Image (cartoon, rainbow, N blue to C red):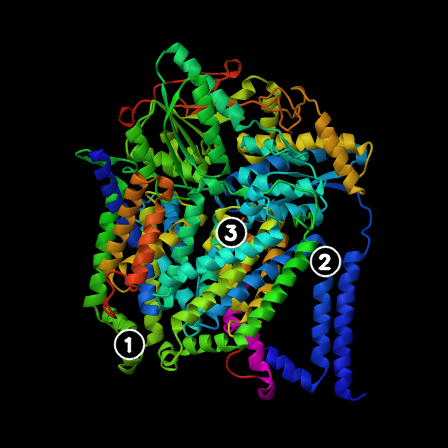
Amino acid sequence: MQAAILQMIVTGVLLGLLYAFASVGLNLIWGIIGIINFSHAEYLMLGMFTAYWLYQLLGLDPLLSLPVAFVMTFLLGAVVQRFAINRVLNAPPLTQVAVTFALLLIIRYTALMLWGPDSRSTITWYSEKSLSVGSVLISYSMLISSILAALSTLLLFLFLTRTDTGIALRATAQDRVTAQLYGMDATKMYTLAFAIAVGITGLAGALFSTIYWIMPEVGAIFSVLMYTVVVLGGLRSLLGCFVGGIIVGVVECLSAFYITPSMKDVPVFLLLLIILVIKPSGLFARKGAL
Amino acid sequence: MSPITKKYAATIIAVVIIVAAIAMYYMWPKPEVISEVKIGVLVPLTGTAAEVGKLEKMGYDFAVDEINAAGGVKSLGGAKLKLIYADHGGDPKTGALECERLITSENVVAISGAYFSAVAKTSSDPAERYEVPYLCPDCVSPGLTERGYKWFFRTCPTDVHLIGGCFDLIDYINEKKPGTIKTVGILIEDSEWGLSCRDVIKEYASEHGYEVTKIVTFHTGTASFDVEVATMKEANPDFLFTGAYTTDNILLTKTLKRLDYAPKMIAGEAGTEQPGWWEAVGDLSYYYFSVMKYNWDIMKAAPKIKEVNDAFEAKYGVEISNEIARPYVSIYTLYTVIEEAGKVASPTDLKTFRRVIRDNLVKLDIGTEPRWMIMPWKGIKFDEKGQNERAYALMVQMMPSDGKYHTVWPKELATAEPMVPMPTWSER
Amino acid sequence: MIETVKTLAKKDKRLIVVSLVIAFIILAIPFVGNPFITHSFMLAFLYASLALSWNLLCGYCGFFSLGHHAYFGIGAYVTMILMLFYDVNPWIGVIISGLAAAILAAAASLPLFRAVGRWFTLATLAFAETIKLIFINWDAVGAARGLQLPVKPESLYWLTFAGPEIYYYLILGLLIIEAIILYRIVRGKIGYCLQVIREDEFTAMSAGINPLRYKTIAMIIGGLFAGITGGFYTTKYRFIDPFSTMDWILSVEVAVCGIVGGLFSFAGPIVGSLIVIPVSFYVRSVFGGPLGGKFFGVHRLIYGCILIAVVLVMPEGVLGWIEKRLPMSARISGEE
């Protein structure tokens, strides 16, 4: 029994880290640009497919295709932001909902049309191998992905705090008007923010491709999860996002174990409701800071 | 009239004319054309089972192409069979809607569908109300033929057959090596099919004298099976039955390896029957048992099956599998009754034609002779509930020797001996 | 928009005639159209009634709820349970459904309104998802398999019919009654207070309006109508499960209808539904079947493209867009 609980917690933490990494992008978009991006999970799917095609066509290990996944989704994100999101920045939030929902449909079903519905996976040397630490099994892919996720987040953090562009981004997020007065181009900043955010999600997708299957409809599975993580952890806080993710992962695993697996999401949602009601901006939110 | 009033009058007249035109178009009697006989087909072309939809479509198209090439419906002057596809995407609501559309807008003479038991359940409701024959080739939830519907027929075996065959196999294994399998675990999804399957397993397990020690249900589309597998590993039954559609099954199998859990015997349904699954997980599928309705090694039993398979392979590049064979047989079944119906009625009088088709389905009595009967059944004959009483199922096992399924049950059709227990992951 | 119509109508009779023609077409559709068209318009009216009740809280009060479908789902389940297990006929059933949904709305208001802005939206989403999860695991009401009504002979008492025609008029009737009631509410004190709250809650408070009280009222009224709508849904579809009646996509679709039509006018949600739903049906039936076999999911793609085009060109909705183009004198500025 003891071993099982420990296994649950470890798995929960690892899963949570992955969920968190997938949600960082959403966190950024929401925190900086302020819109609810319904199509976010689709970029995850795109990252997965990029990794898959590179694996299929060039035999590239998905981990090596990470930079490519980032770049491709980054570019797509920039285009989407420029032509679609920018136009509705000042529209009521509901219009933003409609636009991002439409984008969800477009991205997901273009993928379905182009690549067909079959689910695929990548098979690598570390696929399905596990490390034993005592009585606990840690899957290689999850471990490697978590480490890379943490590394990427660190890079992101450094970018946002140490580079000029990063600081400018955060300034625009905190107070758009003042930032513009200081000569920053808000539109360019938003485009950059959006592109980075979806780029990271694409990267997360590439990582995920070693663990999950790859298919156009995969976004449906992750989207509500991503929102839960972001809200739990709080906006504009990278650390919060990771904590949120871990909480979701662990709560999910433990409740599945103690109650029943089909109810594993209920405590997560209840927790979300409670947090929303008590501290709506999330556990770690700070106003304007990152 | 002033020019402004004239403009308004013109607008009003224009609107009225448009309305009248639309009304006339719909009320205009359509010319009587019986160059084609339409059959409505409900398939999942989007959603999580889209891969299956793709395969089924191949089976359906292949059958229709063969029939039309051989002269179509001869009793109706060579009218061609035409399939009208509707995508239900796995959603029961859409399925019902699309079925209604097929019946009322497309004027189909019969419906075939829908793979998901939940969708078949709802979409057969309009068929029953509008009195249109609904032939189901691919749903296994037994409850579908227990509703007292008069227009619902099913050609394929139900979970009762499938699970029954499974436990017969387990009995056989225990005969050879007594005491191998004593306990049963069930890991199954919580859909219409999953839950009724679970009930059937519980029933048969107790009938055959096995103890069900753990039941875990999950919801399709879950992002992780870690907890479910860990729970099952903890309970450690000798025999694990997994019921998941393809996508979930892939993740499930990978999780089994990841958490190093290998029960003595593992069998699956639905997901394990799809090439999509075993191609995606590769050698992780070895030693897996599966219920199966059609398997390639059946060809050894009857040369005509090989003939049909080769023709199919020549056209589509893949072997016939489960999801191709069942629709194929269903279309031919419908074709047979339509041919008979065409002798006494015509699709121009839809209501009567559909009724005659239904009556013919009730009277239908087919053995194994027709070339198109490629399923390993004893034929087709529907009982009073609409279930084909001559259907039955196979049990197959994925052999490590060649990475293909070999039939292990029933004995008359078996081409290999079952290999139990399954070696642990590290032993392979 | 209705004010605009009245003002314009006073000026010339043209609008009255056009309105009458539109009314005639709407009433005539089941007779001249085939069942499929009737069905898609019936569904459009259903979504319209949902969008209308949803907009009370959203357009008028400024609180964007993505959990409205929970009330719809509860309504559907209550009517189904009453019909299936207790032989209660649906006419009574839908009233009880509405009440049940209203009670749920009242209970939900307390925790939900503690959150504001986008948090409120997420809270409503989480709330609705929790309800859905509970129903998925609740064996007594069918759990994930759902509940299905057995086939009964056609009757008005049990509201069972094969075709959509009767349901068409039924839902249309519901929509009209709901629109009249909501219009009176919106034009009255409640509507006024909601709009003040929308503009600025603090100002409202200093004017003596208790925001929580009015927000709760809006939620309850919205929930009541959503519950009744859900009850009628059950009678037509005869099968319900947590995914078809409680999934968040439903709320998104309702929101899309409202957005396309224009949230800041009373008739916006209705117009939006009448456009969005038939278009999505049309796209699916034309592109879904034949082309869908070759290119999976093409119909959803096309729907998405149309949606984004409409929203980008007319971000304030169809009615908002039309209002902008009317001459100043005919426009009634501000809220409706």
Q: Secondary structure at mark 2?
A: helix
**Quick check: is C135 in the magenta stretch?**
no
Q: Is residue B277 left or right of residue A238?
A: right
Instruction: Say yes or no: labels 1 and 3 on the same chain.
Output: no
Q: Which residue is mark 2?
A: C30
Dot 1 amino acid type: Asp
Residue A116 circle label: none
Q: Residues within 10 Å of mark 1 (few under 14, many from 20)?
A: few
Dot 3 amino acid type: Thr
Q: Which residue is mark 3?
A: C245
Residue A129 appears in the picture as rendered? yes
Q: Is residue B363 left or right of residue C199?
A: right
Residue at (57%, 79%) from the top-left corner? C323
Q: Secondary structure at mark 3?
A: helix
Query: Which segment is the magenta one?
Result: C305-331
Residue A9 on image: x %, y % = 23, 42
Residue at (31%, 57%) from the top-left corner? A274
Residue B397 on image: x %, y % = 43, 23
Q: Secondary structure at mark 1?
A: loop
Q: Which residue is mark 1?
A: A175
Q: Is residue A24 left or right of residue B63?
A: left
CA–CA distance in space, label 1 to label 3: 42 Å
Instruction: Give the label, 2 or 1, closer to the camera.
Output: 2
Q: Quadrant of the C terminus of chain A?
A: bottom left
Residue at (28%, 78%) from the top-left corner? A179
Instruction: Say yes or no: labels 3 and 2 on the same chain.
Output: yes
Q: Nearer the viewer, residue A108 or C58?
A: C58
CA–CA distance in space, label 2 to label 1: 56 Å
